[in-house]
Image (cartoon, grey):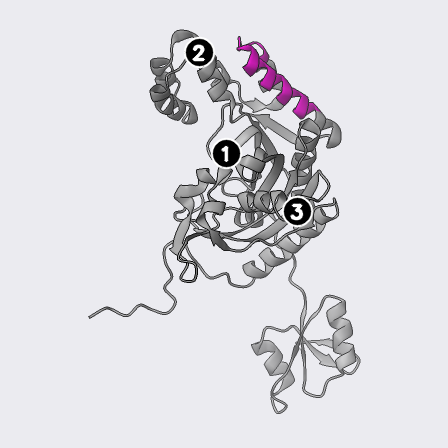
């Protein structure tokens, strides 16, 4: 006989969003979307689930291991639940909005679902919000998106954010220049990802090993890190990418003086489908990164376009946003002045209407967590 489960028990990594945190998340998402829309980004709403071929095509192939798959009983085709929004935005841009003038600015917010969580983010379902700039190549587009992410977070109440700039493709450039065999790359990449200097020296030839160790050590505040990297002997293609990163850092500083920038050029975990610069946003008090973004190709390979964007992880964002002072709550007794109650709501009050005309208004206000009772002249504090 199957043991019955408690009705509140949910699968691992899934949880109910409860007040007040769920309310804070909704308010913060609305605030962020209003901010980015003010910069010309128009909101789109892709479906939660779609055909697997479209969801996991092109850049989406990197998300295959994170994607829930189900059989569509109507079409008898496999479908996938989105683990991320970026690929869907690229599909929309290069198909339904392909005739819109470029650059195309789009934004989004909603739920994603993943097969498994991570150590820092064990939740498998969570809210993402973000923006994508599609059809524009070059550092001006990258600087706009990075500054927009920082300023949107600041407008939502995040202070002391740090932008960490990366070059996810740099490692492959170095591998190609030094002729690293395909079979040797995964192990060496893992050693670099874990900043394991001893393993890097063991797996790489002396010239590449010295280069990688120097780059691993050249991390930290952007100005200092880029100065250290400039002293490292790099192949021409790698040197060109580092120079472009230095130019991008200068553009960001010019657009938003005082923004804290750090550099870790070899960081590539989580940037598998990126084709250029990548970046992450961190803040005190938040677990893991608040945002991630960078340069990629939007849409299917046969119709892909240059794109750059960012995704905000709302659970981490809420950790970094100070809790707002809750709105005052007032109980309106039966037969109250409805126009007065609406004026209070318009001014930011929470007004509950009493359902029981016989109940003592003061006692009912206390029971429902209201600090006031609505009288003829306005709210009256509960003693």
In the rendered image, which quarter is residue 312 located in? top right
In contact (CB < 8 Å): disc 3 and disc 2: no
| Residue 178 numbered tag | 2
**Residue tagged 3:** 97
Q: Is label 1 in contact with label 3 (beta carbons under 8 Å)? A: no
For label 1, the crowd category at 10 Å Cα-Cα, with few meaning under 14, some 14 to 19 and many 20 or more, is many
The answer to whether 331 appears left or right of 344 in the picture is: left
In space, the residues marked 1 and 3 are separated at their CA atoms by 22 Å
Residue 377 sits above or below residue 44 on the image: below
Local SS, label 2 = loop
Separation of marks 2 and 1 at Cα, in angstroms? 23 Å
Rounded to the nearest angstrom, the CA distance separating label 3 from label 2 is: 42 Å
Range covered by the magenta-colored residues: 230-250
Looking at the rendering, which quadrant does residue 3 occupy?
bottom left
Between 245 and 197, which is closer to the camera in this rendering? Answer: 245
Label 3 SS: loop
């Amino acid at each position: 006989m199957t043991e019955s489960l408690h009705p509140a028990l949910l699968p691992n990594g899934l949880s109910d969003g409860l007040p007040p945190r769920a309310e804070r998340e909704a308010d913060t998402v609305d605030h962020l979307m209003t901010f980015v829309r003010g910069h010309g980004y128009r909101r789109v709403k892709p479906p939660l689930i779609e055909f697997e071929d479209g969801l996991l095509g092109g850049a989406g192939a990197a998300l295959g291991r994170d994607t829930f798959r189900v059989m569509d009983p109507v079409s008898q085709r496999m479908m996938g639940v989105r683990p991320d929004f970026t690929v869907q935005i690229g599909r929309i841009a290069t198909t339904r909005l392909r005739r819109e003038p470029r650059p195309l600015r789009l934004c989004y917010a909603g739920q994603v679902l993943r097969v498994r969580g991570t150590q820092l983010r064990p939740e498998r379902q969570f809210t993402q919000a973000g923006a994508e700039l599609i059809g524009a190549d070059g550092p001006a587009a990258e600087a706009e998106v990075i500054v927009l992410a920082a300023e949107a977070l600041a407008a939502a109440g995040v202070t002391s954010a740090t932008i960490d700039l990366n070059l996810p493709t740099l490692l492959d450039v170095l591998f190609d220049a030094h002729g690293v065999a395909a079979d040797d790359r995964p192990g060496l990449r893992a050693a670099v990802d874990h900043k394991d200097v001893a393993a890097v020296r063991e797996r790489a030839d002396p010239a590449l090993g010295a280069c990688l160790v120097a780059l691993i050590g050249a991390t930290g505040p952007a100005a200092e890190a880029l100065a250290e990297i400039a002293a490292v002997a790099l192949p021409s293609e790698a040197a060109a990418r580092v120079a472009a990163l230095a130019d991008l850092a200068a553009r960001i500083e010019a657009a938003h003086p005082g923004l804290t920038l750090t550099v870790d050029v070899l960081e590539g975990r989580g940037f598998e489908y990126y084709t250029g610069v990548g970046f992450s946003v961190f803040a005190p008090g938040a677990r893991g990164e608040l945002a991630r973004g960078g340069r990629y190709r939007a849409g299917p390979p046969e119709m892909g376009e240059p794109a750059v964007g960012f995704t905000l992880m709302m659970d981490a964002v809420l950790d970094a946003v100070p809790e707002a002072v809750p709105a005052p709550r007032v109980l309106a007794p039966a037969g109250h002045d409805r126009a007065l109650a609406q004026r209070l709501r318009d001014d930011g009050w929470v007004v509950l209407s009493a359902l029981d005309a016989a109940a003592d208004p003061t006692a009912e206000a206390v029971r429902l967590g209201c600090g006031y009772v609505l009288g003829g002249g306005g709210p009256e504090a509960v003693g």
